[in-house]
Image (cartoon, rainbow, N blue to C red):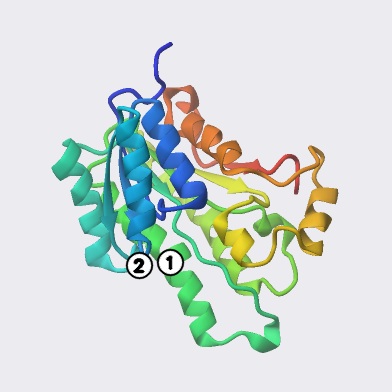
Amino acid sequence: MSKKLEGKVAVVTGASKGIGAEIAKRFAREGAAVVVNYLSSKAGADKVVAEITQAGGKAVAVGGNVSEVADAHALVDAAITHFGKLDILVNNSGVYEFATLEEITPDHFHKQFNINVLGLLLTSQAAVKHLPEGGSIINIGSVVSRLTPPASAVYTGTKGAVDAITGVLARELGPRKIRVNALNPGLVETEGTHTAGVIGSEMESAYVAQTPLGRSGQPNDIASVAVFLASEDAYWLTGEQLLVGGGLR
C-alpha cells in the first residue's frame, strides 16, 4: 500500500509527548521525514525519534521555544539542513492553565498567548519561506473555542485566536497554493491531561456524557486526521476547522 506522505518533510512542534508525539510517529509511518521539536523534554523527543528510526523512518529531535524568533527559525532550518526541504508544518505546541476571571494575571495571559498564538505565528512565518505549492500548515486548536468552559478565558482565548488566524493565513497563503487548516481536538487522554487531573475527574465524565461517541479521545484519533490534512487527500481543503472530538461541540 502506498504511503500517504512518501518523500515529504514535516516539522511538528511540541512533539515530545501526547498528541504531537503521536502525529510525528504517524507521519513517519506514512513516509515523511520528521523534525520532532521539544521545549523541555529532550528525553521524550529522543524516545519519539528512536521509535521512528527503529521502525525504519527518518527523524531528528530539535529543541527550541517556538515563541522565540531565533528558535522558530532554527527549527525550520533544521528541516532544510537534515532533509533538504519542508512540506508540512504542524503547530502543535501549546500550554494550558485554568483560572477564573479573578485569578487571571499578566503572567498567566502571556505564558499561554506567547506559546499558543505568537509561537504559531513565528513558526509559520519561518516555514512559509520554504513551503512549496501544495504545502500544508496544520494548526492544533481545540473544541474549547466552541465549548467556552468556565475558568478558561485565557486558554480558550488562545484557541479562538488559532481559529481566526487559520482563516486569515488560508486567504493569505492561498495564492501560493499553501493550505492552512485547524484541527480542533476534543478531550484527549495524554500525559498533560493526566497531570492536570482531568482524566478520571468529574470534568472528564461531564465531557464524555456530551460526546456522542461516548469516550475521551486518544492521540491516535487525532493523528489520523492530521495525516489526512497533510496529505493530497485534503488538497481542496483550506481555512477549515475540523472538530475531532467524537461529536463533542
Q: Amino acid at mark 2?
A: Ser
- Taking depth in this image into account, of 53 and 198 the one nearest to the observer is 53
Quarter of the image where one finds residue 157: bottom right
- Looking at the image, is 24 positioned above or below residue 146? above
Q: Secondary structure at mark 2?
A: loop
Residue beneath the point at 60% across and 37% down: 221
Q: Looking at the rendered structure, which numbered label has been put on residue 171? A: none
Give the Cα distance between marks 1 and 2. Answer: 5 Å
Locate residue 119, reporting x and y percent. 38, 63
Q: From the viewer's perspective, is 168 left or right of 194? A: left
Decide if residue 61 is in sight here: yes
* Labels 1 & 2 near each other (Cβ < 8 A): yes
54 to the left or right of 202: left
**Which residue is tagged 2?**
67
Residue 196 found in image quarter: bottom right
Residue found at x 35% / y 67%? 67
Label 2 Cα neighbours within 10 Å, binned few <14 / some 14-19 / many ≥20:
many
| Residue 138 location (% of width, % of height) | 45, 44
Of mark 1 and mark 2, the one earlier in the sequence is 2
Dot 1, how many residues are within 10 Å of its Cα: few (below 14), some (14-19), or many (20+)?
many
Report the residue at 65% width, 87% height from top: 103
The residue under label 1 is 115
Q: Position of residue 238 (x, y in %)?
A: 49, 37
Q: Secondary structure at mark 1?
A: helix
Regarding residue 9, the answer to whether it shows in the image is: no
Q: Is residue 225 left or right of residue 31?
A: right
168 shown above or below 242: below
Q: Amino acid at mark 1?
A: Ile
